[in-house]
Image (tube, rainbow, N blue to C red):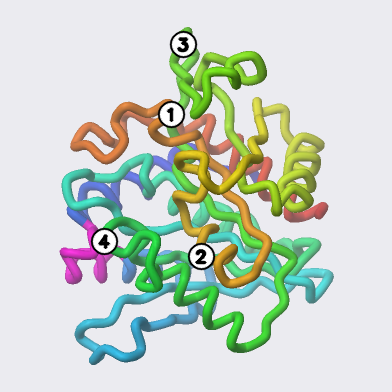
Amino acid sequence: MAADPQILQRHVKTLCEDFFPRSTFRREVLGRAGEFINMTLNHLGYAVQHQHFPESQPAHKQFVNYWVDIAGKSSDTIVIGAHYDAVDSTPGADDNASAVAGLLEIARLLQKKTPALTLQLVFFANEEAPSFGTEHMGSFAFAQMLRRQKKPLMGMISLEMIGYFTDAPASQTLPLSLLKLIYPDQGNFICFASTFGNFSLVNHVRKKFRRSSSFPSETFLGPALVKGLLNSDHSSFIANGYKAMMITDTAYYRNLNYHTPADLPDTLNYEKMAAIVDGIVAMLEHW
């Protein structure tokens, strides 16, 4: 069974059109988007777990992370996550409905499979401002919960914008001009990225993905000060002492619709998204 571009497109359209704007400031709409994720996972046969945060707030002021556990051949655990909120001004097709759709499709494809490692597929609230970079991020609350439980992880993979691709020349920009000597100038690849301290995880994911997929891929490792390198939920896990990385289409280094009203479902390439999902699923099966 392979990833279905039509299912991916349907999920993205639902998130963008039925739950707009799904931001921290629109708690009711964001809550309904979370309920859609919960319902979709339930229909796939999963028992969905919920984390309400911040615990210090009354129930009507809390947000929700949703996750499912998938038992693997080994009890060693990997977290794969995607945030389901968007900034207030955008439908958020690439950022980050693309990754939510991809994670839901990963869940569908793993229904009757046993991955190499035990998986936690997590859908985070509150990645965007004003929560970003603070303890109010859903991913920070989740990573902090795991740390309190003294839960060991092999690593965490954040799916952050996986839907925008173009073959246009000079469509890919980079944080440093010297990197033009190393990386393509066309925005048609997926990138595995993190800080230097996460080299082993990034290198392993790259090797396993490339063994199972011919989809163009690149890796980027750098210091934390590189613009955008920690701009996703993996930053919360790194802050809590875990190895973590992101899989991304490189966001604003390529997609000019980033955080604008133009980040619409019809700007994404669902066939390429499906190929990426297939590569990730194969990687998880043969970790």
| Residue at numbered disc 1 | 253
C-alpha gap between disc 4 and disc 3:
32 Å
| Magenta residue span | 22-33
N-term-proximal mark, 4 vs 3: 4
At label 1, counting other C-alpha atoms closer than 10 Å, the crowd grade (few under 14, some 14-19, many 20 or more) is: some
Q: Which residue is mark 4?
A: 130
Secondary structure type for disc 1: helix
Q: Is residue 99 left or right of residue 285?
A: left
In screen coordinates, is 108 left or right of 14? right
Q: Dot 3, crowdedness within 10 Å: few (<14), some or many (≥20)?
A: few
For the point 38% across and 67% down, which residue is it? 134
Distance from Cα at disc 2 to Cα at disc 3: 32 Å
**Position of 45 relative to 173 (above/below):** below
State the CA–CA distance, disc 3 to disc 1.
11 Å
Q: Which residue is mark 2?
A: 236
Q: Amino acid at mark 4?
A: Pro
Report the residue marked by disc 3. Answer: 170
- Which tag, 4 or 2, sits closer to the chain's start? 4
The residue carrying pointer 4 sits among few (fewer than 14), some (14 to 19) or many (20 or more) residues within 10 Å by Cα, namely: few
Q: Earlier in the sequence, mark 2 or mark 3?
A: 3
Q: Is residue 29 magenta?
A: yes
Can you name the residue that lies furthest to the top here?
169
Tell me which label, 1 or 4, sits earlier in the chain: 4
Q: Amino acid at mark 1?
A: Tyr
Q: Nearer the viewer, residue 217 or 47?
A: 217
The answer to whether residue 17 is left or right of residue 210 is left
Type of amino acid under label 3: Ala
